[in-house]
Each structure stands twice: as C-alpha cells, then as structure tokens.
Amino acid sequence: MTDILDELEWRDVLAQTTDIDALREALSKGPITVYAGFDPTAPSLHVGNLATLLILTRFQRAGHRPIGLVGGATGLIGDPSGRSTERVLNTEDVVAEWVSKIRVQVEKFLSFEPGPTSATLVSNLDWTAEMSAIDFLRDVGKHFPVNRMLARESVSARLAGEGLSYTEFSYQILQANDYLELYRRHGCTLQLGGSDQWGNITAGVDLVRRVEGGHVHALTGKLITKADGTKFGKTAGGAVWLDGSLTSPYAFYQYWLNADDRDVVRFLKVFTFRTREEIDELEKAVADRPFAREAQRALAEDLTTMVHGADELQAVVAASRALFGQGELKELPAATLQAALAEVPKAAVPALGASFVDLLSDSGLVESKSAARRAVKEGGAYLNNVKITDEAYVPAADDLLHGRFMVLRRGKKSIGGVEVG
C-alpha cells in the first residue's frame, strides 16, 4: 500500500488530523475502513464536495476500504457549519429524491468490485429513523457536555449572530452517532471531511471513545481558495455542480479551462490523479508557455472525463473548437451547442428579420451598432464561422443551426450567440 498521508501532504490537501503519528501507524498495519459523509442539501454535489470525495477515492486506491455515507437523516436537519442563518428545512420526499441522486454521484468515484477494498454505500437514515427521541437522549445525548458543544466554532459563531435552533444545535450529535454506528457495523476507524467539519468529526471521535472505548481518527481536507479572491466553485451563474443538468458539461469544462495560472497546479494536485512527475511537467509549462494553457487543458479534460465521461469530453472539446472556427458547427448536438451559447453573450429574438449588425449589437458582443458596422467593414465579424462583409445582411432560415441557433464571432476570440423563437 502507498503511504496515503505522504501523498495527501504532497498534494497539499491535508488540513487537520487528530494524531497524525497514530494514524500513520494504523495505516501501516493494513487496510482500515474510512468514511466520508455527503448531505443532500441540494439535488447534486458540487466541486467543493468533490475535493473530499477524491480524498476518499485516494484512500481506496491506496488499499483501504471506503464508505460513502449519504445523509438521509442529517439532510433533514441541516449542518450549521459555515452558515450565518438557519437552513430552510426540505420535505422528506425532496430529501429522499436528492439522496438517490447523490448516491449515484458518489458511486461513480468508488469501486465496488469484490475484494478487501470494496466500497460500501450507506444512508444514516437507516439507523437514525428507528431511534426514538428517548433512546437518542439517553443513549447518545448523555455523552455530550453542553459546555463543550457551545464552544464548537460552528455553534459559537451562530450564537454570536442570529442564533441557532435546537434542531441545528443537535446536528453534531447526529453526525457523531454516524461515526459510532459505522464503527460498530463496519469497524470504521477514520472519518474524512472538509476543514469546516472538524468540530463535528471530533465529536464523533470522542463519542466512540466514550461509548465503546475505541481509538478512532479524524482527518480534514483544506478549504479550497482561489488566488484572485473569488469564491472557489462559483461562477456568475451560481455553483459548479456535478450534475450535468445543473451545470452543463460544456460549462464544467470551461470552468477548469479558465483556471488562473496561479491556481492551476494546485487544482491539478487536488482534483486529478496525475503523478508528481506529470504535474511537475505541467507546472514547467505554465512558467515557460503560459499562453498554451497546457495545464488548464489537462485539468479540464481529466475532470470532465471523471465527472461526465469520455464521450461528453469529446463533445465539449469539439464544441470549443467549432465555436472558434476550428470545427463544423452543424455537427454539434443541439444540447451541446445550447450549453455552449449559454456561457457567452446572447440575444434572444422571437423571429428572424433583424440584420446581422443588429444581432451583433443586441447580443452584447459589441457595444453599439456603429461598432458592429465597423467590425463588419474591417472583416472581423462572422456568422456561424462565415465572414460577413455586407453591413445590410439579414440572416435567413438557412443560417439557423438546429432550427434556432446562430453563432456570432468578433475577431478570433470573442463569441456570442442568437436564439430564435
């Protein structure tokens, strides 16, 4: 087995452990069982969750047994960590639907092939739903000193602000009980999570010790940040989701392709399985040939393949090339073209009839009609990759892609779109 802790340290994802020397010793003795939990607070995981999920995957690849926990119970409550206000509670039906979707996403990253490292997938609703309030208070709650619960950062921060309901206050007990149940049922001795989960995870470590006398471990990954100060995993349109119906594969690919040079090597370490040697080569490419964006392309291709599959990667790469005149736009699937145009300035018109100059201006690709006429006059305006030289040109039905789209381009790099109807 590889030394997984050394790898996590090299990849600069390791934030906190309860006792790294004791954990290293436990890992050296043979396979351990390790789990990470994912709450269904939305119908999909996002790229922030992906960082934790990949740490779990790395443990499996290093020879350990992973458990993916989907929070069918905790998702009904809501974790106060990192939040300044109370969550809006979702219905049981909604949470159950989201649990199903997230289970499918987690399954894609783990191997369930029979063997010593075969993965397990569970929902904490399985053991929480059957527990009565009396059982919960007597068997679990009695092990939680209130003064220590109040001192946890996720609680104290809320108490200093808008306050905290008893529902969310109890979240850390539910999560701690998950660790206890997985210790009992599967011999699990390591819980993973994001750094904002440290208080909840260590509450579980303490509960296992108090109830079973077991010595278990905790490990958290670093919070991912961006060098330009903007929030990681966010775009102008919102979060970057793993579900292609919420963030299209094209938009997902473009998110990573547009990574800042200052971030891309770190993202390669966190989000890909490339070796140290491969990443060193790409880091050198960033320094020597930043214009080539080799590292960004490698990052975008690896992640799009990992999350959406090789076929979707092929489709979005083809779309990217075609939009910039290096491929045939008519060969792109309608869904891929629509997703690509959703990421650029676009005009929506009820019917054909507007001039090409008007469409350039209305799309926002140029700042005014005079600028549009100037672009046409100078030979830098394109409709579906065909240069337009007539300022009076009015697009016709033959110009529509899939009967409703047109791709506008100004120069080599500025793309816009039109959707008709």
Image (cartoon, rainbow, N blue to C red):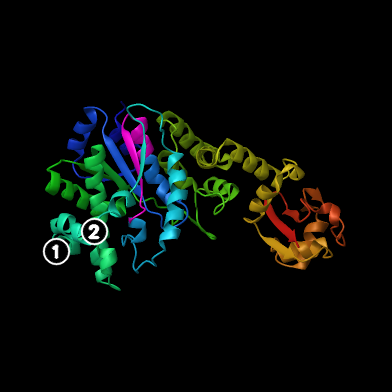
Q: Nearer the viewer, residue 245 or 331?
A: 245
| Residue under label 2 | 132
Residue at the image point whose x is 45% and y is 57% from the top: 42
Q: Residues within 10 Å of mark 1 (few under 14, many from 20)?
A: few
Return the x and y of residue 283 as percentages of the image width and height: 46, 37
Under circle 1, the secondary element is helix
Task: Name the side, left or right, on which 155 lies relative to 114.
Answer: left
Q: Which segment did they paint magenta?
A: 56-73
Q: Nearer the viewer, residue 124 or 188?
A: 124
Return the x and y of residue 37 as percentages of the image width and height: 34, 48
Under circle 2, the secondary element is loop
Amino acid bearing label 2: Ser
Q: Quadrant of residue 129?
A: bottom left
- Residue 64 drawn in magenta: yes
| Residue under label 1 | 147
Q: Is any part of residue 154 visible from this angle?
A: yes
Q: How many marks?
A: 2
186 relative to 180, above or below: above
- Marks 1/2: CA distance? 25 Å
Q: Which mark is residue 274?
A: none
Return the x and y of residue 90 as percentages of the image width and height: 41, 64
Q: Nearer the viewer, residue 362 or 349?
A: 349
Residue at the image point whose x is 15% and y is 63% from the top: 146
Task: Name the side, left or right, on which 129 lies relative to 403.
Answer: left
Q: Quadrant of residue 119?
A: top left
Residue at the image point whose x is 81% and y is 48% from the top: 386
Return the x and y of residue 19 as percentages of the image width and height: 18, 41
15 relative to 172, above or below: above
Residue at the image point whose x is 29% and y is 30% from the top: 3
